[in-house]
Image: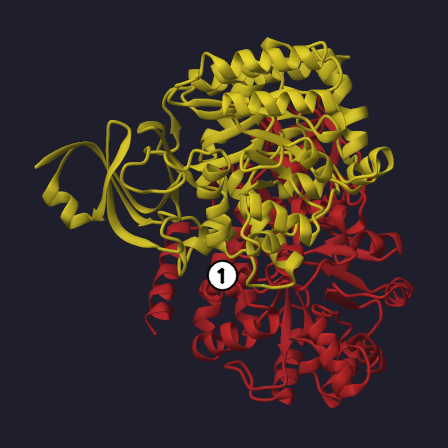
Chain colours: A red, B yellow
Amino acid sequence: MQRCDTLIQARWCIPVEPDRLVLERQGIAVTDGRIVAIEPLRAMHDRFDPGVVVDRPSHLLIPGLINAHTHAAMTLFRGLAEELPLERWLREGIWPHEKKWVSAEMVRDGSKHAIVEMLKGGVTCFSDQYFFPEVVAESAIDLHMRAMIGTPMMDFATPWAENADEYLSKATDLVHDPYADHPLVSSCFAPHSTDALSDDSGRKLRILADQLDRRVQIHLHETTTEITNTMKERGTRPLTRLTELGLVNSSLMAVHAVHMTHEEMRQFSAVGVSVTHCPGSNLKLASGIAPVQAMLDAGINVALGTDGAASNNVLDMLGEMRTAALLGKVQAQDAAAIPASTALRMATLNGAKALGLDDNIGSIETGKSADLTCIDLNRINSQPVYDPTAQLVYSCNREQISDVWIGGRHLLDNGSLTHVDEDEILQRSVEWQQRIAAV
Amino acid sequence: MQRCDTLIQARWCIPVEPDRLVLERQGIAVTDGRIVAIEPLRAMHDRFDPGVVVDRPSHLLIPGLINAHTHAAMTLFRGLAEELPLERWLREGIWPHEKKWVSAEMVRDGSKHAIVEMLKGGVTCFSDQYFFPEVVAESAIDLHMRAMIGTPMMDFATPWAENADEYLSKATDLVHDPYADHPLVSSCFAPHSTDALSDDSGRKLRILADQLDRRVQIHLHETTTEITNTMKERGTRPLTRLTELGLVNSSLMAVHAVHMTHEEMRQFSAVGVSVTHCPGSNLKLASGIAPVQAMLDAGINVALGTDGAASNNVLDMLGEMRTAALLGKVQAQDAAAIPASTALRMATLNGAKALGLDDNIGSIETGKSADLTCIDLNRINSQPVYDPTAQLVYSCNREQISDVWIGGRHLLDNGSLTHVDEDEILQRSVEWQQRIAAV
């Protein structure tokens, strides 16, 4: 008999790779934080002597969900600026509050709130883009959440940096050093958008990203206003400008990509740019509906993100899968577009690919990290179960998520957080709300 | 001191009428199933001697949600026919199963499943359209749910009726008699769609609806295929044909109304037709996006429905509000379209108006029935609370619904169903699934 740390016995398992496979009554063995076997239960019982058995008889096991784009700390601004289009939302609703309130303390409390919200919602990795990224990283490590930390760049002063050079040097420090080989945290460059990126900064960024071999994520073609403004000011579309700056390559994560020509899709596909689709935020800010099925058909890797809680307003990847699957059908005028299995793949393996982490996470495969999420399907809103994938995407809600493991650590156990004082985190958010609303 | 049965003390209350009002720390007194007072807590304590006090310190009280269109029993087909467009979904995915499985027993079990799902999701009234409507009515009464029972009409035989005349006579029997003055159940005529309605049946239906003073609900302009087919076969759009049959008046509930010209909107507004918007189903079947803000601007009463669980796939009015609010923005290309307060109004008072029940339900007003829903906002995904209406629509999920009263009866009490054996109902659904999937 072979020893293993944990044996998970779930009624169903969707490993995501191979695509569309649904396993029934299989066991997943985990040792030293990694998946060591996926086999029928009987074979597992013959082969393994597990330290812990986790029995989930009415549950579905999937790879941990990957939120490929968020601004975690903005949970503290949830519901603060409602029903404004992107540009006014930023200028009137968000930036004045960020100028006043963003600090290391705010980013710590807001990020921890977001991480707990995501953990309880089955998310095991998120890609962040916010100020004080070093604090986001510490918060993720503290709560044992996997994260890619985007170091922000803007053209104006914020509480984190005074000017483009300071953003770049702080980002370089962070990318360079403390998380170089961390098992949970990696980093990338995260310029806000092309209209907040001077030519000079863009060129410096390209050199640094090449030298340090780091990915770049940027909000791109989110609204028609963004495109129209760049056309007016520079005579080109934002993507053309980004191409001229040398930033359009396989290290680029284009967030949103709502407004795309066929030629631009071909370009993304040819050079291997990943897109992060954020359908909830795109709807809420009336930005538009991204042509996701067309991008997938063109061979683009499309991941899924919630965006920040100030424009969504939840960090709920189950809900985001549902929105992506439903919206994708009406956008493509085809009820077969973005099937449930594709929505799940976008929220897992495609996310891992976008972040360059697919060697380690994104699917349930032997050798990969045990980043796993388990959902109880035996609820009034998800019975009967003819098709577990459809149930997961079209019927389940986040409260059905029973278990989450990250790197084999059991962080959510049958609905209870094992390592986090949720009440304390909630209490801090209420205190922030009182301070912010009092002004 | 005045006696009252129940005093509800919730942190916030949105009565819906007047529009956009948010009350804080008020009490709602209920006696004999009706709301008798809404006043600040201190005044309530001076005035009332309550039998029961329900204290909900972090909660939001709203009128019970009204699901203005569903096919309740189809919960048993949830996930059975995925990712097909409406016409193929009906012909290949649904009608063959209905022919095989629909019976009084199936409708009873499926409707009870749906009613429990809706109750737990804060729904206090639903408008149904399915076979064996008398069984739907009994199921609603049995579980103390408010319902409007639509009696179906189609051009072909089903397990409930052989031909148009039998549908009509059975419908007439039902509309006529047993529920004439029932406090919970009312009925209406529910022809499937204009393409399943012959001229002769349509004329008979109009006469009966007039004589019996009953409302008519019909799927209308759901897809472009429906419109194109009618144009080909009859040279008119379905609405024109319905107008010629004399059925377009203030008793009409037009379900879906996805594809509407400005002239058709003016017609609806002029004669007082209500529209039931079912955004989740319209997305899933790739039917299109209804121009809801334009319909509201035209003065049309727009209600909200989930449609059946086979095409949505949940009977979740909170989720449906969110979808309506988000989708309405991108459809109108305006982030201020369908604000949260409007989505809530669609899901409550507009629903009551569509069903002709707004004298009794749809808002928290003195004299109306105590059909109430309470939501706990103190969850990680809905804190902090700057704006309770935004939180309700954009951040909450159905599991946060703590309490439901219908006609003053406390059916969901702090998360627990008081009158229903949910496990027994779930078990029956699992048995149905085994029978249906085995074929």
Please provide percent x and percent y for residue B425.
52, 17
**Is label 1 in a helix, a strand or a loop?**
helix
Left or right: B317 as drawn, with respect to A147 = left
Left or right: A60 as drawn, with respect to A214 = left
Q: Residue at x 44, y 41 (%)?
A: B400
Q: What residue type is disc 1 on? A: Thr
Q: What is the tally of numbered marks visible in this picture? A: 1
Residue furthest to the left in view is B1
Please provide percent x and percent y for residue A363.
74, 44
Please provide percent x and percent y for residue A427.
35, 57
Mark 1 burial class by Cα count in 10 Å: few <14, some 14-19, many 20+:
many
In the rendered image, which quarter contains the N terminus of chain A? top right
Between B317 and B133, the residue placed more toward the observer is: B133
Observer able to see residue B75: no
Observer able to see residue A144: yes
- The image shows residue B101, relative to residue A3, as above or below, that is above
- The image shows residue B128, relative to residue B361, as above or below, that is above
Please provide percent x and percent y for residue B402.
38, 37
Between A436 and A285, the residue placed more toward the observer is: A285
Residue designated by label 1: A75
